[in-house]
Amino acid sequence: MQHELIFAGFGGQGIMFGGQLLAYAAMDCGYHVTWIPSYGPEMRGGTAYCTVVIADQAIGSPVVKHPSIGVIFNAPSFDKFVPMLQPNGLLVYNASLIPQRTERQDLTILPVPATERAPTPQLTNMVMLGALLTAKPILSLEALKAALEAHMPSHRRNLMEANLEALQIGVQLAEAALERL
C-alpha cells in the first residue's frame, strides 16, 4: 500500500500543518512516511503546497509527480494540480473558494464547502482532513486526533476543541457529499 498526496493552497490556510499532521499520524501508526513542503516567495497569500507519501514498505522516492490524492484549497492550486492527479485518484477540494469544475471523469471528486463551514477560516485545514479521511480512510480519525494531541504546539493547546469540532464538520460534509455521488 502506498498513498501519495498533495495538499495545496495559499499560504496561511494551514496547508503545511494539515499535511504534516497527517504525516505524523501515519508515522505514529507505524507507516513509512515522507512530508515535503514547498513555499512560494510570499509568507501569507502566496502559493504553498506539500506532498505526503504514506506506505507500508520503504518509500523508494519522496518525490511525488502524480499524486493519487489531491486536497486542494484554492482555485489557482486546483488549476495547477488537478491535471497531475493519477487516474482513479481522489480529489477533495474546497468548494467555498473554488468555483470551477474539472472535466476529468477518471477521479472521485468530493467538493467540500470547508471555508464557509469551518468555525474559523484558520480551521479549514481540519475540515478538509476530516473530509479526506472519511472519503479515503487511509488512517482512522482516532489516529489523527491522537497525532493532534501529541504534536499540537503548546501555545495552540487552547484551540484543541475547535480543531476537533472542525474535523467532525469535515466528516459530516464528506458523508453528505458521498451520498450524492
Image (tube, grey):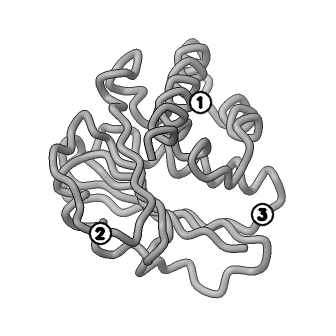
Q: Is residue 157 left or right of residue 143?
A: left
The answer to which image quadrant residue 99 occupies is top left
Residue drawn 33% across the image and 32% down it: 113
Contact between labelled residues 1 and 3, with CB atoms less than 8 Å apart: no
Which residue is the site of mark 1?
A: 153
Q: Earlier in the sequence, mark 2 or mark 1?
A: 2
Q: Is residue 113 left or right of residue 89?
A: left
How packed mark 3 is, by other alpha carbons closer than 10 Å (few <14, some 14-19, many 20 or more), is: some
Residue with the most extreme bottom position:
60
Point out residue 12 in the picture as x, y percentages from the top left corner. Answer: 30, 38
Against 166, residue 93 (above or below) is: below
Q: Is residue 97 left or right of residue 156?
A: left
Q: Secondary structure at mark 2?
A: loop
Question: Which marked residue is nearer to the observer: mark 3 or mark 1?
Answer: 3
Which residue is the site of mark 3?
A: 31
Residue drawn 16% across the image and 51% down it: 100
How packed mark 1 is, by other alpha carbons closer than 10 Å (few <14, some 14-19, many 20 or more), is: few
Question: Which marked residue is nearer to the observer: mark 2 or mark 3?
Answer: 2
Disc 1 marks a residue whose amino acid type is Pro
Q: Secondary structure at mark 1?
A: loop
Point out residue 33 in the picture as x, y percentages from the top left corner. Answer: 67, 66
Disc 3 marks a residue whose amino acid type is Tyr
Q: CA distance from mark 3 to mark 1?
A: 23 Å
Q: Which mark is residue 104?
A: 2
Q: CA distance from mark 2 to mark 1?
A: 39 Å
Number of marks in the rendered image: 3
The one of 86 and 122 positioned closer to us in this rendering = 86
